[in-house]
Amino acid sequence: MWLFRWRPRGIAKHAISKDYIDSRSHLPGDDVLERIFETEDSAEYSIIHDSSLSGILSRGGGLEVQWELEIVDGCATVLNKMPLKGPSTVVLQPIVGLFALVIGINDYQHVQKLTGCVADAQDIVSYLTHHLAVPVNHITTLFNDEANRTNILSKLRSLACDTSIAKNSPILIYYAGHGAKAMAPKEWVISGKENQIEMILPWDFNPQTSSVDNEQGIPDITLRSILDDLAEKKGNNITVILDSCHSASSTRTYDADSDEVTSRGLELPQSYTIKPSIDATSLPRSRLEQISPLFESTGAASHVLLAACSRDETAKEQNGRGRFTSALTSYLRHPKTRIDSVTYDEVVRGLDIHGQTPHSEGFHSRRYLFNGMVKSSRCILHPIVKNQHGQYVMGEGEAHGTMPGAEFDILPEYDPSSSTVGKFLVKESNLGAFSAVVPAGNELPPAAWALHKRGGYQLPIKFESSRVENEDMIIEQLKNACVLDSKERFVIDLDGRSPELCVTSHDGSISVQLTDQQCLNAGLRCLPSLPLQFDRVYPVLNTAHHFFWHLRRTSSGEDKLLVALEAWQLRTARIAARRTPIGDNLCQDGVIRIPINADGKSSGYFGYKIVNMSGVDLYVWMFSFNFLDLSIRLLHKPSFSSQKPDPCLRAGGVLPIGYGGSGTGPRTFNLPDGQNVDVTYLKLFLSTKYIDLSSVEATLGLSEDRADKGTDTGSSGGGWDTYCVSVIQERRE
């Protein structure tokens, strides 16, 4: 934690910790800026602050003045001052140890020159040094002819072996320049319908087919390999920002709206071919192995990508600046943008760029910017907007988990603690796939938000008496808590309905028995025993509610989205792009059987392939539901955009998970000691429109109390569906 205090010269210091550095910078007159901070590393210090750092200077007589400061390498420059009343201490959270590689190319050697890329790259550097106080020696820049192919690859690879970069330090890779697509050489097999390779173009790129390595582009698969290696050695707190046309797989067109608007992309000649052996030393030995593009919407696990535009748009520059980077740095510098509490998805949502739809892609796009922490999704507010028919509509529908009987409070602010201005009940008649209509009669403010309060899915539980007094007392406490649950998440009066769980006591402990047929068939009959304590058992029931709510829910629509899920053992290889399917499809009749060795581990790696037979483009979320600990793990997610994100599974296409350069790691399986069987469900949530299901994941399982969760999205219309198979692990004798 870093404390900034402004005081007149001569006033006694505030008390500080024993581990500190006191650095002073003179302000106008006799005033002194005193910087006080604590750190675990006494060898290196950085100042991290908002774009317009405001401190309070207390003068004699009690007059308080606000100073707007810009801090570069620890030196403060006063930008403005004004009288202000407020506290005398500002507490800020630092981002420690950020390293960056920043590339901008205007003056290409062989292709059309650009005008704004170097200025964009310099603006990124300015933001890092002036507003995040990243030391200059943490930033490597390559501008124009410095950004030749050899230098770019060398600097990218050097990040992985830089001893000054600690594990899990934030790493930023920024590129502004041309991008292009080209057909993959016949020796390569690309997972995807278009069979195209995307490239960023270094300064010395030659648009005519060449056998010279330094005249080639840098293919996406090369970047993928470098990023995978970097993530393995330095952790996956890696941000990639690309202000070029292929950033989100866009087509190559020029914007003719204005002579001042230029596209950052090249249409290569039809005859252009990529050198088949390019970067062979850093890529799979056989290009016959399936490789999917870096910039496809694959939910990459090694990094988060902020892309300038969508698949069908062009990244543009105008008046000497790129539209995307200009909007991005303006957003990040805004006084209301807290760099320590804004996620990549929220950054993209906050950008409004004419003719461009920025995307955030990657497994960890819900992390805070340059931070490994994920934003909590426990309390989610859903926007309520007025549609063209004059109806108020909540962007939360059946696809998100909303069910008839759910009750929502209406709030006037994006604040769950604000006073309610109304309530509404979801019924079948007002519930759509992606939204719910607020019933007429609710007079709402211009901006309104919905907060789920109670109702919806109810977990059926059967409680059984043990006829042991102290044990039955705990059972009665659990029953009463379920009946009185304020969110109405449980039902114990089953009235012929089959329970998901049977709770009883046995030999001084609580037994939670499963009723799922696949579990019973496999011999998995109950959860691990729990102590005879209310406070240990009731949270498990909360977790079970979240688990079964998302596992059991399906679409009520009649039109089904046809897909197939295949499971494969993979060729063993350290690099994901080298892991390819071998043997037969392991998914037979909706069941995947994985043999487990005596040591509790499976043999080799495993991956999945989703085949789209529906005839429409799809967004895919994939989760695993594990019965041993009631955890839900995210295996794949679509990319995000504030408008229409690019679908991740095209009509007639395939989506590999865990291999083929998909960016997600392969699956391995294991059983804990004393456990001979485990049952997991793989569930796909499919939709024709983007939905945010990030709150479904519950990785802590039984160790965390999970409440009802939901997410917000767009409008009604379109369809959604689910697809589910079971995975049974059995220990071999």
Image (cartoon, grey):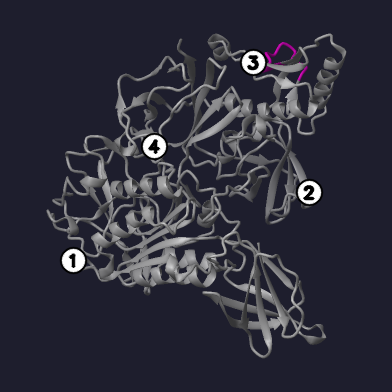
Q: Secondary structure at mark 2?
A: loop
Residue 252 percent across, percent down from the top left:
28, 55
* Residue on which the image places disc 3: 526
Q: Residue 105 sits in which quadrant? A: bottom left
Q: Secondary structure at mark 4?
A: loop
Q: Tell me whether the residue at label 4 lies in contact with that at label 2, contact meaning CB atoms closer than 8 angstroms.
A: no
From the viewer's perspective, is residue 68 above or below residue 150? below
Which residue type does callout 1 highlight? Answer: His
Q: Earlier in the sequence, mark 3 or mark 1?
A: 1
* Residue on which the image places disc 2: 420
* Residue on which the image places disc 4: 649
Does the image show residue 644? no
Q: Main secondary structure of the magenta part?
A: loop
Q: Tell me whether the residue at label 1 lies in contact with that at label 2, contact meaning CB atoms closer than 8 angstroms.
A: no
Marks 4 and 3 sit apart, C-alpha to C-alpha, by 37 Å
Q: Earlier in the sequence, mark 4 or mark 3?
A: 3
Residue 731 percent across, percent down from the top left:
48, 14
Marks 2 and 3 sit apart, C-alpha to C-alpha, by 42 Å
Label 4 vs label 3, nearer the camera: 3
| Disc assigned to residue 110 | 1
Magenta extent: 492-502
| Disc assigned to residue 704 | none
Which residue type does callout 4 highlight? Answer: Leu
